[in-house]
Image (tube, grey):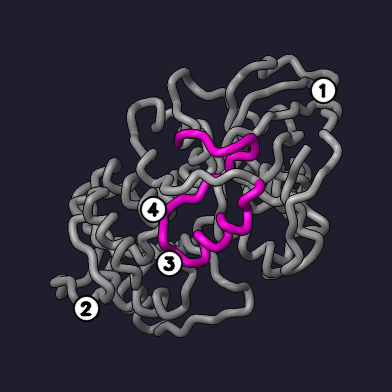
């Protein structure tokens, strides 16, 4: 099969690899779409400590089951599935207290084992979630990032009628905007340095957009501020725009070595809650259910690129000229 192989930081090529064989409890998925994510860029650049090389990346995969390993009774061959890439060990302290996304022996499809930037991928059967009839390939490839947004939403207090500020109008920021709006936000304002992204965010339902949050008339601040960039300037600015008694959600992924400055006194005096949201936690099926119920995220997919043009996909992602880039390992197909 053809697959993207990262031999080490900065060393990436489309190569021929052996077809995967499902082990006990595994299925093989013929990949129809796999999203390109900022985490993949960190893997390519050697900036993700948990990544192991050589590696076939790609953790936002969806496709069709084509083979079952020993002991697997479902999903059946032919079932369209989305792949939850996270594989908690089930035995560490955090797994035993029900916090599998914080697993001490973290493993994941596309991070510590072969992923979805390939024609086929073997995954634990329990990680393959059946998709409803009629769900597009674009939506199927968005289940994993949407499940991250759902987990982020679940980390927030549910107080309908509050005003939200989101830093970052990329795919993840837009998904957060969609889920908080669906949960009863009174308004969603978005900040990004890319005017094209802001224009799309406005068309996608954002109430206000700007390249600088000073443009928003919120003298008391926002009840909820969400960082979906991981950029230190955005985080520091956002912490200063939380209304007294409000909440700041760190949703974006920062470089582990970076540090942000903030006022502990302001956190104390204004009773600001600072919350983190890490990956997926009991949110994969709810994400699928949201899509099945009519949440339309297909417009977020701006580019569907074949495996052989992976360099083009990387260039498109780094340039920030589109929105979500999907890899179609068997050739470009309609999103």
**Do residues under tags 1 and 2 come within 8 Å of each other at their CB atoms?**
no
> Sequence order check: which comes first, mark 3 or mark 4?
4
The residue pinned by badge 2 equals: 214
- Whichever of callouts 1 and 4 sits on the residue coming sooner in the sequence is 1
Q: How many marks?
A: 4
Question: Mark 2 falls on what kind of element?
Answer: helix
Residue 44 at what x, y percent from top left? 68, 63
| Residues at discs 3 and 2 in contact (Cβ within 8 Å) | no
Q: Which mark is residue 69?
A: 1
In the displayed structure, 266 sits above or below 52; it is below
Q: Which residues are magenta?
A: 308-335
Residue 192 image offset from top left, x and y in percent: 33, 68
- Alpha carbon separation for disc pair 3 and 2: 21 Å
Q: State which quadrant residue 84 falls in.
A: top right
Up-down: is 103 above or below 216?
above
> How far is the residue under mark 1 from the one under mark 4?
39 Å
Occupied quadrant, residue 188 = bottom left
User: Mark 3 falls on what kind of element?
Assistant: strand
316 inside magenta stretch = yes
Q: Residue at x 35, y 60 (%)?
A: 169
Pointer 3: what residue? 274
Above or below for 250 versus 305: below
Q: Nearer the viewer, mark 2 or mark 4?
A: 2
Residue at figure coordinates x 49%, y 61% from the top left? 276
Q: Residues within 10 Å of mark 3 (few under 14, many from 20)?
A: some
Answer whether labels 3 and 1 touch (C-beta < 8 Å).
no
Q: What SS does tag 4 mark?
A: loop
Residue beneath disc 4:
156
Residue 230, image x, y percentages: 49, 69
Where, quadrant-wise, is the C terminus in this rendering?
top left
Answer yes or no: is residue 96 visible. Answer: no
Q: Upstream in the sequence, badge 3 or badge 2?
A: 2
């Amino acid at each position: 099969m053809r697959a993207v192989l990262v031999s080490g930081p900065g060393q990436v090529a489309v190569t021929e690899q052996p077809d995967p064989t499902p082990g006990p409890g595994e299925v093989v998925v013929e990949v129809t779409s796999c999203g390109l994510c900022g985490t993949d860029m960190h893997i390519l650049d050697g900036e993700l400590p948990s990544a192991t090389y050589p590696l076939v990346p790609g953790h936002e995969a969806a496709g069709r089951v084509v083979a079952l390993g020993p002991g697997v009774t479902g999903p059946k061959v032919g079932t369209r599935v989305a792949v939850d890439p996270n594989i908690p060990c089930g035995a560490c302290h955090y797994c035993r207290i029900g916090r599998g996304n914080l697993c001490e022996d973290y493993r994941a499809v596309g991070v510590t084992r072969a992923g979805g930037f390939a024609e086929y991928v073997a995954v634990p059967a329990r990680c393959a979630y059946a998709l409803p009839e009629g769900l597009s390939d674009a939506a199927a490839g968005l289940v994993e990032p949407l499940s991250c947004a759902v987990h982020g939403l679940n980390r927030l207090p549910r107080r309908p009628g509050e005003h939200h500020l989101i830093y970052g109008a990329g795919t993840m920021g837009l998904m957060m905007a969609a889920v908080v709006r669906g949960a009863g936000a009174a308004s969603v304002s978005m900040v990004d340095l890319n005017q094209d992204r802001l224009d799309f965010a406005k068309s996608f339902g954002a109430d206000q957009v700007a390249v600088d949050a000073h443009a928003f008339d919120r003298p008391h601040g926002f009840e909820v501020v969400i960082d979906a960039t991981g950029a230190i300037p955005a985080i520091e600015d956002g912490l200063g725009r939380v209304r007294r008694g409000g909440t700041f959600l760190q949703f974006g992924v920062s470089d582990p070595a970076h540090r942000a400055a903030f006022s502990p006194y302001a956190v104390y005096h204004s009773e600001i809650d600072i919350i983190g949201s890490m990956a997926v936690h009991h949110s994969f099926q709810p994400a699928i259910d949201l899509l099945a119920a009519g949440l339309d995220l297909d417009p977020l997919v701006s580019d569907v690129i074949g495996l052989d043009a992976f360099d083009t996909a990387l260039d498109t992602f780094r340039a920030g000229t589109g929105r979500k880039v999907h890899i179609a390992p068997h050739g470009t197909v309609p999103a």
